[in-house]
């Protein structure tokens, strides 16, 4: 083939390194995933093909997935600079957004049998909910927390709720400063299921506000949650069944609390919540189950 007629690749996109990845044109991968609306299972399958594609996904594609799925939340967490490095990795944030870590018994929370981790079909992260998990002295922090993932435990028993969240700029947060000032010890045997770092028990630290139980629909003292050194939050609670009257009353209280805590959230018509109802609709594929198993051991 004439040299002048050879196909030329486009220059690497910002943040990519075509020479190291072995992919001549990473922009093609972006276009492909944009066309399928960043399907989570397809991305997981691609990332497991070989080490080179795994590296591209970890360096570039997981970030693009997070930005596509939760643009407002990511803009808030990164101060409007989504191309900047995020915490320990974008892959970890993607895992937190799309994966329920399951539950085992801890010192402050007992369950009869462990609940395994799994992909979530729906997720809703809210900074208004996050405010309910912060003590009064830490209300200046920005924290997004998901609605609890409901796990039935059996007849005549409360359902198990498993939830997760993430801080913005945890290293400079008031919550971290408070934990250090109180000399709260890190848990010896518990590790963050999302990044593997050590964690603080907010229950042991006596930093769980009463508003957290109200937000979750749980009894006071019926929950436990941890915060890791990277600012990932995860925890469990017992979800109290509500009658129709109690449900109405709880809804009114929740609306009042939203208005008090964040009265200007929706002035521009752009709320603070992230609704992820298209992540994994329907049953999990075999690829999804395999990746969920890998995520549970990482």
Image: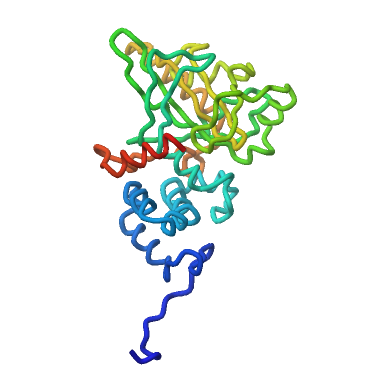
Residue 180, percent across and down?
72, 27
Residue at the far front in the pictured view: 51
Residue 298, percent across and down?
47, 38
- Above or below for 258 versus 172: above
The mark tally for this picture is 0
Q: Residue at x 43, y 31 (%)?
A: 101
Q: How is the image coloured?
A: rainbow
Left or right, 181 with respect to 101, comes to: right
The image quarter in which residue 170 lies: top right
Q: Residue at x 73, y 21 (%)?
A: 182
Quadrant the N terminus occupies = bottom left
Left or right, 95 with respect to 134, comes to: left
Left or right, 46 with respect to 189, comes to: left
Residue at the far top in the pictured view: 156
Q: Residue at x 36, y 89 (%)?
A: 5
The image quarter in which residue 276 lies: top left
- Above or below for 9 versus 249: below
- Above or below for 4 versus 97: below
Residue 223, percent across and down?
49, 17
- Above or below for 223 versus 125: above
Residue 219, percent across and down?
47, 11
The image quarter in which residue 171 lies: top right
Residue at the far right in the pictured view: 181
């Amino acid at each position: 083939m004439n040299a002048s007629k050879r196909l030329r690749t486009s220059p690497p996109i910002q943040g990519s390194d075509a020479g190291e990845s072995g992919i001549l044109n990473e922009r093609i991968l972006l276009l492909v995933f944009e066309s399928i609306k960043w399907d989570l299972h397809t991305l997981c399958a691609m990332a497991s093909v070989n080490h080179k594609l795994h590296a591209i996904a970890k360096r570039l594609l997981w970030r693009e997935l997070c930005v596509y799925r939760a643009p407002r939340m990511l803009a808030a967490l990164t101060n409007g600079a989504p191309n900047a490095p995020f915490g320990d990795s974008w892959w970890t944030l993607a895992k937190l957004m799309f994966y329920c870590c399951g539950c085992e018994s801890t010192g402050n929370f007992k369950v009869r049998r462990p609940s395994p981790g799994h992909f979530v079909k729906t997720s809703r992260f809210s900074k208004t909910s996050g405010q309910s998990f912060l003590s009064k002295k830490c209300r200046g922090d920005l924290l997004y927390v998901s609605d609890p993932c409901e796990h039935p435990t059996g007849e005549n028993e409360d359902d198990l709720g498993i939830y997760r969240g993430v801080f913005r700029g945890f290293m400079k947060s008031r919550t971290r400063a408070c934990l250090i000032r109180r000399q709260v010890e890190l848990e010896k045997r518990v590790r963050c299921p999302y990044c593997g770092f050590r964690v603080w028990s907010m229950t042991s630290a006596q930093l769980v506000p009463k508003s957290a139980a109200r937000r979750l629909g749980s009894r006071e003292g019926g929950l436990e949650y941890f915060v890791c050194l990277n600012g990932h939050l995860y925890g469990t609670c017992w979800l109290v069944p509500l009658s129709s009257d109690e449900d109405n009353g709880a809804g009114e209280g929740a609306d009042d609390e939203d208005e008090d805590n964040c009265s200007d959230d929706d002035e521009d018509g752009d709320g603070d919540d992230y609704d992820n109802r298209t992540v994994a609709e329907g049953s999990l594929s075999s690829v999804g189950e395999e990746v969920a198993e890998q995520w549970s051991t990482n």
